[in-house]
Image (tube, helix red, strand yellow):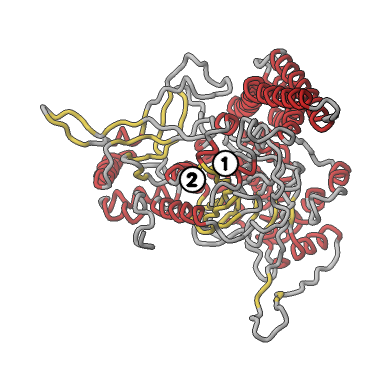
Amino acid sequence: MKLPENFGVNVFNDSVQKETLPKEVYKALRATIDAGKQLDVSIAGAVAAAMKDWAVSKGATHYTHWFQPLTGLTAEKHDSFIEPDGDKVIMRLTGKSLIVGEPDASSFPSGGSRATYMARGYTAWDPTSPAFVKEGTLYIPTVFVSYTGETLDKKSPLLRSMTALDKQAKRVLKKFGIDCKRVNCEAGPEQEYFIISEEEYYKRKDLQLTGRTLFGTPVTRGQELEDHYFGVIKPAIGEYMRDLDEELWSYGVLSKTKHNEVAPAQHEMAPVYCTTNVAVDTNMLTMELMKKVAHRHGLVCLLHEKPFKGINGSGKHNNWSISTDTGLNLLKPGDTPETNTLFMLVLTAVIKAVDDYQGILRAFVASAGNDHRLGADEAPPAIISVYLGDQLGALVDSIVKGQNYVSEGKMQGSIGVPESPIFPKDATDRNRTSPFAFTGNKFEFRMLGSQANVADANISLNTIVADALSQFADELENAKDVEKAANKIIARELKAHYRIIYNLDGYGPEWEPEAAKRGLLNNKNTADAVPVLYEDKNIEVFVKQGVYTREEAKARADIRLENYTKIINIEALTMIEMAKRDVIPSVSDFVADLCQNVAAKRAVCEEIPYNTEKNLIARLSKLNDAASAAVEKLESDLKAIDKEQIVPAAKAMAHTVIPDMDALRKAVDEMETLVSSDYWPYPSYFDILYSVK
């Protein structure tokens, strides 16, 4: 692939729009995309015609409205361009077909906001995210709403949250004499993933049905030597990564960085961050392409947060920032942040928002898969806190304590030899244990799971920061001296929300009790984290900022808990099936053969005690009985759960079923270490993690 000529060749991007659209149509469309103006529907026909001609030139025969229902995945229904023209057909895309579609909405989750029998739903074109051609189809990004107007997707509230942040930030900027057309929020979600052999994958029922191994003992060499991290990339993985990069680049995805991650078979791709709406869409496309490209190479891409017990799982760090259309980054401190009042005010708004709505942020990254990572010394703790680094931390400390701040000025680094260049040091280190860390000119929200739709995290961030900025704007608009009023707000709010700032080790044993003293939430699983979304305070912030209605907010909480319950139920049923049909019989066969061997040897020589075989037979028989008993308890506890009761069902899954699953796994995993590999029904962790060369 030739770069940069072929970058974005499959995307109906700005350069293609400029080339193919009439001048006035192009200007009207760009006004919607760049300045957030209402779409002029009269241009739809011209845009549709140009889009269709371009897509057909790329080999497309169909188009689809590409949307993101509340499954967290993407959805698509394909229609061909053909229309009858006598005995022939013509290729056509009308303005109406571009703007609106009508997929059946009955089988998508709605959280009770729409009756199941009410099937009509609408997809509506989102012109702010460019269309693209993939596999002979024109993909048109859209929102998805019900007949009665409830949003049924991730994109609609994301766009609303971006509008809310734009509106409130511009109110603050206006008081500082800064005029702009738009304030954009930007995101850059780093993507971690595992790559394994397709051959081994299809030997594991648990991987196929749940995305993770429900049984399995850690390999004797995992990540202890720290040699895989940033290590030499294996040839097969290198070929996959090159193919993936070219695929992503052709779709305009700004894939920038690739490397080995901490665990064996684990890797990472990091993009350049861009407007949040586009970042969300491209990340969904990225996850799809990761899997498809892997298949072409005889590999499987695992995006589950914890595919393998005993080694690091995968997350998705969401780099988030705010900037104007004129290029002003509102989270860039400059050389003297102590005199940059606007920056300090925006920083204070973020800190206030994170503290006030820590429960929302935690709930919006909660999932069955992510529960395995958070607080496991491989990802941030489940406790929300903000890391500012040395420079900003010292500045905030001085404001809170009423002390004078003395800047250290620009810092430089060197290894102390003349051949080494002097390099500038950042004002802040990186704290990998922090859930929400300032990294120079942006925040890194590090709690997201690797398979998450990043819309949720950005919806929550945009909304709560917009709310804080709206409160600040209310004060500034009534102030005679804006600078003085802003500094008063900064000092007051930093003191009020100082508890959320933590610049030390989030893995340290002292943090959890310290967080409890500070009154910070510590919801360790989804069942405990999500119910905070039903609280009036947490619903009202979305309503106030126009992101969700009360019904939509409640529906999101219901869906998250229902999904959690369904996932744990599937995992439990899969474990039961694997144990009953594969593991327990295999162990019984191995024990029976051991018994036959002992009997045969005794027939030859009765005097030998055969203690090794007898002890192994006794131990395995005991463990197999324990596994069988664990299966029975798990089955019984699953049957006792009323899954119609959303919150109690999720709590039961978290506090009863998961411990049952742990007990079953403990017995099975111990047996794996004792049974001959010839008898064990599944590939081992070694077989899976080290199969790709």
Measuring 63% from the left and 45% from the top, which residue is drawn there? 314
Q: Name the quarter where the N terminus is drawn.
A: bottom left
- Report whether 671 appears left or right of 207: right
SS category of the residue bearing label 1: loop
Labels 2 and 1 touching (C-beta < 8 A): yes
Q: Is residue 475 left or right of residue 56?
A: right
Q: Which residue is at the front of the view, 314 or 284? A: 314
Location of residue 224 with respect to 213 vertically, above or below: below
| Residue 215 x/y as whole percent | 68, 32
Instruction: Point out which mark residue 290 bears.
Output: 2
Does residue 535 show up?
no
The local crowd at label 2, few if under 14, some if 14 to 19, many if 20 or more residues have their Cα within 10 Å, is: many
Q: Is residue 375 visible?
A: yes
| Residue occupied by mark 1 | 303
Q: Is residue 70 above or below residue 342?
A: above
Reading the chain from its start, which is encountered first: label 2 or label 1?
2
The residue positioned farthest toward the front in the image shown: 604
Please, what is the three-letter code of the amino acid marked with disc 2?
Answer: Met
Taking 586 as reference, is 414 above or below it? Answer: below
Choose between 174 and 518: the one closer to the eye: 518
SS at circle 2 = helix
